Image (tube, helix red, strand yellow):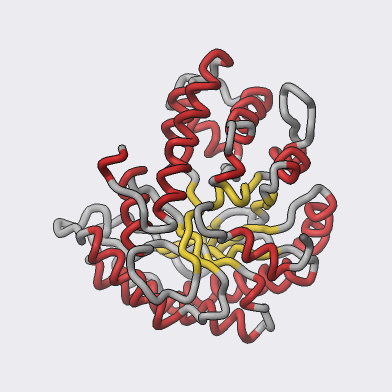
Amino acid sequence: MNDIQDIAQAMVAKGKGILAADESTPTCTKRFESINVESTEENRNAYRGMLFTADGIENRISGVILFDETIRQSTLDGGVLFPEHLSSLGIIPGIKVDKGAKQLANSDDEKITEGLDGLRDRLKEYYELGARFAKWRAVITIGEDIPTAYCISANAHALARYAALCQEQGLVPIVEPEILMNGDHTIEESYQLTTETLYTVFYELASQGVELEGMVLKPNMVLSGYDCSEQASIQEVAEMTLDCFFNTVPAAVPGIAFLSGGQSDELATAHLNAMNQIDGTPWNLTFSFGRALQVPALKAWSGKADNIPTAQEELMKRANFNGLATKGEYSSDME
């Protein structure tokens, strides 16, 4: 399967979602500190290996986003490179290619994602290493007088340049414009800024000739700010998120793989489920979760080989719940 349209469709297949395992080394170190495990390359390899060898993972996970270190690592038992191992299960290997969000020039509180320099050559190498899709995350912050149109436009332009390069090299781009939900903003403000951001992103994608049928959108859900005194209901989040997307996301896009963005595991699943109970969406609605899939497994593992079966069960429990949510068949009673 090398056609980008076919790959994009497979990435957002009903009943499955994308496992985001592309944490940078500093982020991984923070996660490991929470379970008192030293963040060595060996321990990171063991942890990722635990995730990728879970029994039945291919039934619920369509693709895995890897980090530069991880795409070069191997399973501990058989020494099979992770991309090769995942591909043998029918899971599509992907790669995070951005270099992180840095301060935007002439703006104290806004970020621009870097990593375009040398990207074409890096994509060629990652393709040879087995990657068939890539990911680039733009970060938009809501605050006093921000985001500015300048910040949204600069990030959208970079996302489109990255996406065009990916498709040129035969990789499906995951386009991730994340509006952070930290703060006390209302769901109405979140709706307005998500709408404005997505309009700008799709304008830039069209301007740069990106084939919409060969990409996957990874957006935030439209939520109340985490510190907002009035939290929207699950149904309200589902309806406002989809209303926003009906107004901004072309039907040619095969699927939307939501990020969890710091929501609790259960709430992220419940929101996805509620959206999939609403009829008439032209895209497959699925998940691309990191923390919301991994946290229970990470705690169960705690760096001990003896805990691997229990940790894998925890991963598959969340993967199963989210797989059901892609069909609108999840219930909180299952927790």
Q: Please indicate whether residue 228 sits to the left or right of residue 144 in the image.
A: left
Residue 43 x/y as whole percent: 62, 23
Q: Please indicate whether residue 191 sits to the left or right of residue 64 in the image.
A: left
Quadrant location of residue 318?
top left
- Give the total number of marks visible in the rendering: 0
Q: Is residue 226 visible?
A: yes
Q: Is 42 or 117 nearer to us in this picture?
A: 42
Quadrant location of residue 274?
bottom left
Indicate the quadrant containing the N terminus: top left, top right, bottom left or bottom right.
Answer: bottom right
Single out the residue that lies furthest toward the left: 229
Residue 192 x/y as whole percent: 32, 76
Q: Image point 43% across, 48% down: which residue?
A: 322
Indicate the quadrant containing the C terminus: top left, top right, bottom left or bottom right.
Answer: top left
Q: Image point 47% across, 74% down: which residue?
A: 152
Q: Image point 51% across, 81% down: which residue?
A: 250
Residue 326 x/y as whole percent: 44, 57
Q: Image point 67% across, 48% down: which residue?
A: 91
Above or below: residue 230 compared with residue 88: below
Above or below: residue 284 compared with residue 148: above
Above or below: residue 50 compared with residue 243: above
Q: Is residue 111 visible?
A: no
Above or below: residue 285 compared with residue 90: below
Q: Please indicate whether residue 43 sits to the left or right of residue 108 in the image.
A: right
Q: Is 96 or 308 nearer to us in this picture?
A: 308
Residue 238 x/y as whole percent: 30, 65
Quadrant location of residue 180?
bottom left
Q: Please indicate whether residue 31 sits to the left or right of residue 52 in the image.
A: left
